[in-house]
Image (spheres, rainbow, N blue to C red):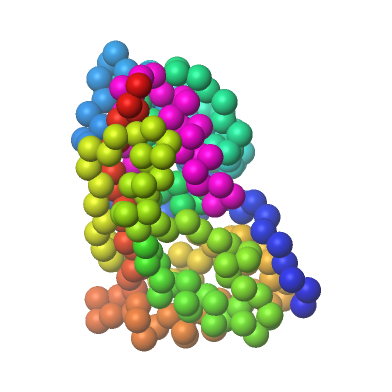
Amino acid sequence: MGVKTLTKQEWNPTQYQSIGAFVPKLGEPLIALLAPTPEMRILDLGCGDGTLTQVLAVSGASVFGVDASPAMVQSAKEKGLTAQVLDAHHMAFSQEFDAVFSNAALHWMTEDPQKVLHNIASALKPKGVFVAEMGGEGNIAAIREAIQKALASYGLDIEQISPKFFPSVKRYQTMLEQSGFEVIQIETFPRPTPLPNGIRAWIETFATGILEALPQSEREAFLQAAETYAKPKLLTGDGWFADYIRLRFKAVKRS
Ligand code: BEZ
């Protein structure tokens, strides 16, 4: 099989709301870290289907969601939210927001993460707040190792077809500072996450870009192989777990 190049992953909002419901649920502590108020205008970067955008809006704040996935933005709009299809690499807001909020999205923005931070800083008013959580160094390493082993028989490389950006605290703190932020708090922590529907459902929901790189006829065998390779590390007496590691921070734009 020829070398596949990176394409944008398709998202299925219905499947995401069922299998991926834990993503916004476990992102709720971030809302408390931001402490939204009715006076705030907030940019929700990578808003997905708008579940957390809606929680932010309950505070009375004016919230604008952006996401690179048209299907997800459509789903957010169906909830009555204001949202737009936009890739953060091409965002050109200028001092419009009091806060930028982002949950489980920044690691998808791999083309130029420093540029993404620069665009976020530009979108904020002076002293604007940036609160986010993303995958940290080592995030889902066991899942990616199992997927890579299963992809090897097709001559495919996960780093090529589905790169992710999972930085360390030190690296991301430096990047935030280089984009003009003062880091108020930053931490990383493991968050083993139960997968009641198993690892296959996780791959089918979160790694559609990898499945799309394979011919339809090979997908079932690939999923079986990935599940087999994942078992020793991720199937416990209490069921399947995903080896998430989060990087959470709060930063303020300097001026
Ligand atoms: C994450 O939230 O860490 C994540 C989800 C799906 C794919 C990669 C990372």
Whether residue 14 is visible to the viewer of this picture, yes or no, is no
Asked if 176 appears above or below 200 in the picture, the reply is above
> x, y (%) of residue 122?
47, 26
> x, y (%) of residue 127?
31, 22
Residue that lies at the very extreme toward the right in this rendered image: 2
- Which residue is depicted at the point 46% across and 25% down? 123
> x, y (%) of residue 79?
46, 30
Left/right placement of residue 143 relative to residue 153 reads: left
Asked if 192 appears above or below 107 in the picture, the reply is below
Asked if 93 appears above or below 85 in the picture, the reply is above
Is residue 47 found inside the magenta-colored segment of the image?
A: no
Q: Quadrant of the C terminus?
A: top left
- Which residue is depicted at the point 50% across and 32% down? 119
Please state which of residues 96 and 21 is positioned toward the viewer in this rendering.
Answer: 96
The part of the image, by quadrant, that contains residue 59 is top left
Whether residue 152 is visible to the viewer of this picture, yes or no, is yes
> x, y (%) of residue 234?
35, 77
Residue that lies at the very extreme toward the top in this rendered image: 39
The part of the image, by quadrant, that contains residue 236 is bottom left
- Which residue is depicted at the point 61% across and 34% down? 90
Q: Quadrant of the N terminus?
A: bottom right
Left/right placement of residue 220 relative to residue 205 reads: right
- Which residue is depicted at the point 74% across and 71% down? 3
Asked if 107 appears above or below 151 in the picture, the reply is above
The stretch of residues the image draws in magenta is 110-133
Please state which of residues 32 and 176 is positioned toward the viewer in this rendering.
Answer: 176
The part of the image, by quadrant, that contains residue 246 is bottom left
Number of marks in the rendered image: 0
